[in-house]
């Protein structure tokens, strides 16, 4: 008898076919986040679930799936999953690291450049018919080249952003709970500094930390107050790492120059203060959103799912210590 799996939102047809060849598939055919009741109903009787970051896989959800053996998340982050509860129940939790590293780093740098050079403002200015003649001081931005980039969290994506910064001849500082090896520092031309030093000295601050209790509101009013008035904040990690209300105030009052945001504190809701500010570039959580990368993420999640259901150790097991 084939294992039953629940797919919480539509995925690429080629991957669906692969899973259906080895499993009995239940799925949500509508491209929307399920209500709690719908999620519970879908999980009932299933041994596996292929879920997304919009699905809250907490203790309550697991209680509705007593046969569940694996939670395969289509994301690098897994803050939507109660990993401790899963481990307690012997449920494997997997994610999709590495495959989106370069794509997300591209996008972080795209946000940096767009915010620095006021690209969205310029696009709107050109489209609106306001552009009547060339002017020496029209929409002046900030140079990225030879600037100082502060990276908070030098993991896979942070390192990829640092490599891009080298092409712009930037000074790279980084902060985080662990210092990288001398070899990595030399390769990236990166210098390890305390967070306060990074905030004070950086022209651009890019966030690349996972969402944990200790990183929630890692950047709030006190941290924003340390930044240069000409500094730009970039966030492509998780929205709650930044205190959005404090950021709005800092941007509104000119205490920092700008921001580029792909993630938000209460997605898909965006703080109304951000929506009206011209000095912030907003994107709807599309950091990994290239065709190639999103397909590979789903393929990897399916590989994890099928490996776990066949009794193998999945390639990307998050709670390895529990098994």
Image: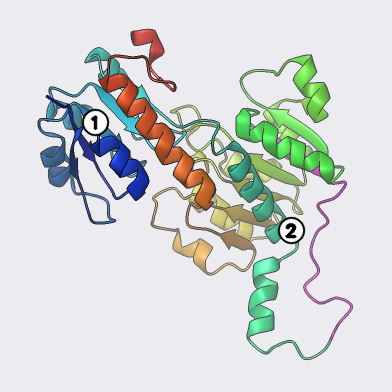
Side of 323 where 114 appears, left or right: right
**Depth order, front residue of 134/32:** 32
Can residue 57 be seen by looking at this rendering? no
Side of 40 where 72 appears, left or right: right
Can residue 25 be seen by looking at this rendering? yes
Q: Position of residue 229 (x, y in %)?
A: 74, 53
Side of 312 where 225 appears, left or right: right
Please say whether residue 152 is one of the residues in the magenta stretch: no
The magenta stretch is 134-151
- CB atoms at circles 1 and 2 under 8 Å apart? no
Please say whether residue 145 is one of the residues in the magenta stretch: yes
Side of 110 where 291 appears, left or right: left
Figure quadrant of the N terminus: top left
**Depth order, front residue of 17/66:** 17
Q: Residues within 10 Å of mark 1 (few under 14, many from 20)?
A: some
Q: Which label is found at residue 22?
A: 1
**Depth order, front residue of 35/310:** 310
Please tell me whether mark 1 sits on a helix, a strand or a loop.
loop
Image height of 109 relative to 77, above or below = below
Main SS of residues in magenta = loop
Number of marks: 2
Q: Residues within 10 Å of mark 2 (few under 14, many from 20)?
A: many
The structure residue drawn at horizontal position 66% and vertical position 44%, both measured from the top left corner, is 225
Figure quadrant of the C terminus: top left
Residue 169 is drawn in which quadrant? top right
The structure residue drawn at horizontal position 63% and vertical position 40%, both measured from the top left corner, is 102
The structure residue drawn at horizontal position 64% and vertical position 83%, both measured from the top left corner, is 127
């Amino acid at each position: 008898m084939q294992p039953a799996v629940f797919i919480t939102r539509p995925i690429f047809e080629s991957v669906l076919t692969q899973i259906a060849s080895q499993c009995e598939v239940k799925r949500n055919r509508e491209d929307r986040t399920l209500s709690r009741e719908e999620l519970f109903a879908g999980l009932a009787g299933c041994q596996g679930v292929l879920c997304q970051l919009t699905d809250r896989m907490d203790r309550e959800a697991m209680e509705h799936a007593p046969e569940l053996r694996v939670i395969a998340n289509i994301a690098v982050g897994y803050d939507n999953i109660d990993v401790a509860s899963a481990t307690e129940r012997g449920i494997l939790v997997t994610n999709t690291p590495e495959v989106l590293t370069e794509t997300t780093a591209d996008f972080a740098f795209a946000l940096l450049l767009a915010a620095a050079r006021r690209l969205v403002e310029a696009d709107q200015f050109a489209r609106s018919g306001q552009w009547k003649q060339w002017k020496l001081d029209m929409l002046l931005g900030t140079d990225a080249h030879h600037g100082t980039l502060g990276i908070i969290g030098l993991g896979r994506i942070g390192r990829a952003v640092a490599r891009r910064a080298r092409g712009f001849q930037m000074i790279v500082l980084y902060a985080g709970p662990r210092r990288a090896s001398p070899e990595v520092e030399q390769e990236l031309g990166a210098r390890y500094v305390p967070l306060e030093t990074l905030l004070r000295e950086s022209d651009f601050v890019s966030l690349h930390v996972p969402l944990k209790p200790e990183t929630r509101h890692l950047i709030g009013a006190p941290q924003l107050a340390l930044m240069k008035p000409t500094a730009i904040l970039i966030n492509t990690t998780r929205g709650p790492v930044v205190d959005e209300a404090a950021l709005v105030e800092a941007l509104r009052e000119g205490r920092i120059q700008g921001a580029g945001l792909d993630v938000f504190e209460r997605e898909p809701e965006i703080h109304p203060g951000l929506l009206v500010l011209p000095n912030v570039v907003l994107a709807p959580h599309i950091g990994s959103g290239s065709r190639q990368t999103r397909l590979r993420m789903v393929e990897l999640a399916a590989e994890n799912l099928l490996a776990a259901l066949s009794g193998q150790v999945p390639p990307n097991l998050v709670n390895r210590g529990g098994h």
